Amino acid sequence: MSLTGLKSHAVTLYEAGKLGHASIADLCRDLVTLESAKFEGELQEFANHAFSLRCILECLTSGGIVADGRENIGLYH
């Protein structure tokens, strides 16, 4: 697992305060690398947050369409 891409996104967010659409897609691809890794303690919490962030970003950029074949759960009826 390489954290170089994630560090680059962190620097961009810190310096510019935002990411463009293409950068968000790159960030999601980089966040996927954390999913299979196991950490201890607080680092595992950060990895769990990274997973959640990726899911939310993918949902927002897809317009609410689930990309992996799962159906929408219909929270807002």
Image: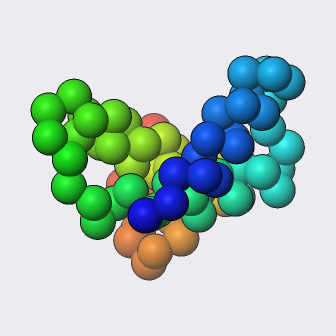
Q: Looking at the image, can residue 64 be seen?
A: no
Residue at 70% x, 59% y: name it: 26
- Find residue 73 and report its horizontal and vertical position in percent: 36, 55
Name the residue: 78% across, 33% down.
12
The foreground one among 44 and 73 is 44
Q: Is 23 on the left-hand or right-hand side of 29? A: right
Residue 68 x %, y %:
46, 74
Q: For the point 42% across and 42% down, which residue is it?
A: 50
Does residue 71 appear anywhere in the picture? Answer: yes
In the shown orientation, is residue 4 left or right of residue 1? right
Residue plotted at (82% across, 56% down): 22
Q: Could you say where residue 14 lies in the image, as x and y percent from the top left?
A: 73, 21
As drawn, which residue projects farthest toward the bottom?
Answer: 69
Q: Is residue 41 left or right of residue 20?
A: left
Image quadrant containing the N terminus: bottom left
Q: Could you tell me which quadrant the C terminus lies in?
A: top left
Q: Is residue 63 above or below residue 17?
A: below
x%, y% of residue 60? Answer: 64, 47
Q: Which one is in front, 42 or 60?
A: 42
